Image: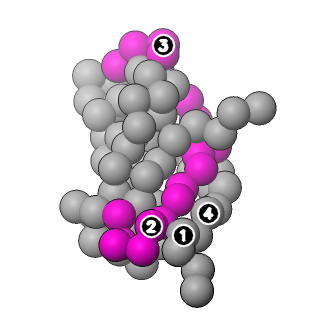
């Protein structure tokens, strides 16, 4: 019996550059949540984003989020998915 499933994902955030500069980082966070929920087959309410991912996106401020981000998603038995930045 598998109690958890783990995946490393590269999430493209290029589309965010087309949105208004004052909303880019917050839209990037929504894009991460939607991408992970879609690929892990869970509702977006069950995706928990770790503060390390939040800090990585907001590192350069609201106007300049990264164009892509690498995350580690772990899906537990109860359907909750935890998203964090993988440690090198």
Magenta segment:
59-80
Quarter of the N terminus within the rendering: bottom right
Graded by Cα atoms within 10 Å as few (under 14), some (14 to 19) or many (20 or more), the crowding at tag 3 reads: few
Q: Which mark is residue 6?
A: 4
Q: Which residue is mark 1?
A: 4
Left or right of residue 64, residue 72 in this image: right
Pointer 3 residue: 60
Q: Secondary structure at mark 1?
A: strand
The image quarter containing residue 29 is top left
The residue at the far top in this view is 60
First-in-chain label (1 vs 2) = 1
Q: Which residue was labeled with disc 2?
A: 76
- The reply to whether residue 15 is in sight is no
Does 77 appear above or below 47? below
Q: Is residue 51 left or right of residue 7?
A: left
Q: Position of residue 52 (x, y in %)?
A: 48, 28
Q: Is residue 69 left or right of residue 42?
A: right
**Residue 22: percent from left, percent from top:** 26, 22
Task: Measure how far apart labels 1 and 3 are at the Cα level.
Answer: 33 Å
Mark 4 element type: strand
Disc with the residue nearer the chain's start (4 vs 2): 4
Q: From the viewer's perspective, is the residue at label 4 or at label 3 nearer?
A: 4
Q: Tell me if residue 74 comes above or below residue 26 in the rendering.
A: below
Name the residue nearer the viewer: 77 or 70: 77
Residue 13 percent location from the top left of the image: 51, 44
Q: Is residue 78 magenta?
A: yes
Could you give the CA–CA distance between mark 2 and mark 3, rounded to whole angstroms? Answer: 32 Å
Identity of the residue drawn at 48% across and 72% down? 40
**Residues at marks 1 and 4 touching, judged by CB atoms closer than 8 Å:** yes
| Quadrant of the image containing the C terminus | top right
| Residue 20 shown in magenta | no
Q: CA distance from mark 4 to mark 3?
A: 28 Å
């Amino acid at each position: 019996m598998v109690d958890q499933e783990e995946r490393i994902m590269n999430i493209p955030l290029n589309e965010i550059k087309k949105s208004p500069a004052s909303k880019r980082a917050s839209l990037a966070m929504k894009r991460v949540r939607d991408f992970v929920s879609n690929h892990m087959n869970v509702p977006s309410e069950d995706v928990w984003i770790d503060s390390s991912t939040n800090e990585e996106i907001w590192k350069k401020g609201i106007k300049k989020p990264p164009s892509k981000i690498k995350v580690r998603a772990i899906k537990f038995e109860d359907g909750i998915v935890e998203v964090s930045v993988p440690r090198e």
